[in-house]
Amino acid sequence: MAKSTKPTMEIFSITANTILIRPWQESDRPFLRTLFLHARREAWPWLDGSDWQLEDFDAVTRDEVIWVATQNGHRLGFASVWTNDNFLHNLFVDPQYQSMGVGHELLEHVQKTFTSTGSLKCLVKNARAIAFYQRHGWHIEATGDSPDGEYYLMHYRLE
């Protein structure tokens, strides 16, 4: 039997580096402060962010459970939840890592922590975020007004 002279092709499996979601640590604070400041400016360009400061992160996440998305030791984003109400208060991804599954992983993790219907408020002008939440099973329930403009109250029902 003649030996094949066809070149052999080896197939290598390449595994994408996993995005890990972990509880926040105090050592995350400087990075998350900076991320929160810059990501809001990127996400909400129609708002005047001239008064925003790094310490805003501390105020808006006080008494909330905070989850941090990391990959290879790099912080990529965070979510904060008011657990008593299953209320997703913040979900921000570093702009350079958006559309890479980070927000998806954070949201999936948060949804698994809900004990009943989850809720969030999303500014009506933030069409990209509204579409993101709707793709993940969130539904607009009502509208309201805030100092930053009109918002949608959205719900996520546990199955």
Image: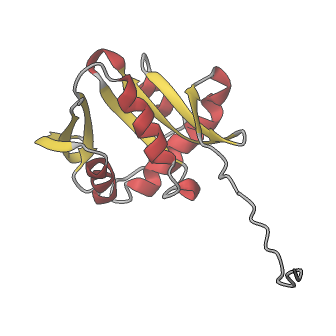
**Displayed quadrant of residue 88:** top left
Q: Which residue is nearer to you in this view: 7 or 32?
A: 7
**Residue 19 location, x and y as percent?**
59, 42
Instruction: Identify the residue at horizontal 44%, vertical 48% (top origin).
Output: 40
**Residue 33 location, x and y as percent?**
56, 36
Q: Is residue 86 left or right of residue 61?
A: left
In the rendered image, which quarter contains the C terminus? top left
Determine if residue 148 is in view.
no
Outermost residue toward the front in this view: 1
Specify the color scheme.
Answer: secondary structure
Q: In this view, does 96 lie to the left or right of 1?
A: left
Q: Which residue is nearer to you in this view: 80 or 22?
A: 22
**Displayed quadrant of residue 117:** top left
Determine if residue 47 is in view.
yes
Number of numbered discs present? 0
**Residue 63 location, x and y as percent?**
42, 16
Q: Which residue is nearer to you in this view: 49 or 144?
A: 144
Q: Is residue 3 left or right of residue 69?
A: right
Q: Is residue 116 above or below residue 48?
A: above
Instruction: Identify the residue at horizontal 79%, vertical 68% (top origin).
Output: 10
Q: In this view, does 137 lie above or below 44?
A: above
Q: Which residue is nearer to you in this view: 18 or 43?
A: 18
Instruction: Identify the residue at horizontal 51%, vertical 29% (top origin).
Output: 67
